[in-house]
Image (tube, rainbow, N blue to C red):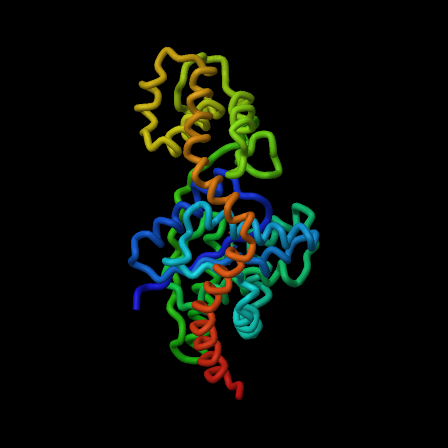
Amino acid sequence: MKPVVVSGLKPSGELHIGNYLGMLEAAVALQTSNKYDCFYFIADYHALSQHYNPREKAEEIFTLAVDVLAAGLDPKKSAIFIQSHIPEHANLTWIFNTITSVGKLEGMIEYKEKIEEGQTPNAALFDYPVLMAADILLYKAEHVPVGEDQRQHLEFARDTARTFNKRFGKTFKEPEAILTRALRIMSLDNPQKKMSKSLPKGCLYLSDSPKSIKAKVRAAATDSFREIGYDPEERPGISNLVLIYSEFSGLAIPAIIKKFKGAGYAEFKEALAEILIQKLRPIQQKRLTLLKDRKAVMKILEDGAERAKPIAEKTLLDVKKKIGLI
Ligand code: TRP
């Protein structure tokens, strides 16, 4: 059997190019290498730990599934499914709760941040890392592609594996993080802040129309140097645009600076918008086709769950035996 890769994507709004270049690109690359058994799921249970509107959440879950498929996750290669369709995730969470100390959960950075942001401190938000450990260990993952912000949660999953093994006998491998490239794609109109859906004017969504891409890129913040350059400290606006150009064109940053020597910002922005429009077009076409065919998408997700389920069931059965359940 090939080593297992597991990762989850939390449905909380539409995907933007920052998400695409980070997590998704890494997930697609691991799948394409054919070296791993990949399990990718929509972390819908995780998404419920924060305040939400039920109808919107249902739509977000579906749209995220569509977005990841359009962006290149391939159901022929990877098991793509919805977390809550495999009840073993929640069952194993409960069991892991019995070996998790409250003190450790209290120390989790993301939990503290969320509380500071004003999220209700419900038990699910508190228990978030335990569910994530269950997600990973259920499939005996060896590698987990995650962003830097999830590093502590991954460390938590490793500790959980170790604690469990010590108490009940060797059962789990300690998963390794594959840290996705720490690309900092900034908001177009506010390059001091990371691109995010909470800053909609500076956020380029995978679904943005050519018109909206042009408008957002034209309105992007630059500076008064009047020359294309790359210096994220001193010139965050133009540097961010150059970085995006580089990512979507495959051209290295110095080559871009050379290419646009003597060109004004307006010309560069037009070229950037063109590249984005071109590169996003096939993703958008696929996205539209999938959005119209809800049945086909649900079938893909059901098939993905079919593949994941026997593995999840086997792990849970083994765990139950080991911990003294009959
Ligand atoms: N917590 C992750 C995030 O916010 C999403 C996630 C849930 C996840 N379960 C996972 C990632 C398991 C990797 C493995 O991005």
Q: In this view, does 116 lie above or below 247?
A: below
Rendering quarter of residue 230:
top left
The percent coordinates of residue 219 (x first, y second) are: 56, 21
Residue that lies at the very extreme toward the bottom in this rendered image:
326
Tell which of 71 and 293 is nearer to you.
Answer: 293
Residue occupying the point 69% across, 48% down? 118
* Residue 100 at least partly seen: no
Q: Is residue 245 above or below residue 44?
A: above
Q: In which quarter of the image is the N terminus?
A: bottom left
Tell which of 61 and 242 is nearer to you.
Answer: 61
The percent coordinates of residue 229 (x first, y second) are: 39, 20
Residue occupying the point 60% across, 59% down? 106
How many discs mark residues in the rendered view?
0
45 horizontally vs 228: left or right: right
Tell which of 234 and 252 is nearer to you.
Answer: 252
Residue occupying the point 42% across, 41% down? 182
Q: Is residue 202 above or below residue 312?
A: above
Tell which of 128 and 30 is nearer to you.
Answer: 30
The percent coordinates of residue 143 (x first, y second) are: 37, 59
Rendering quarter of residue 177:
bottom left
Residue occupying the point 54% across, 32% down? 209
The percent coordinates of residue 187 (x first, y second) are: 54, 31
25 horizontally vs 67: left or right: left
Q: In this view, does 211 lie above or below 265?
A: below
* Residue 300 at least partly seen: yes
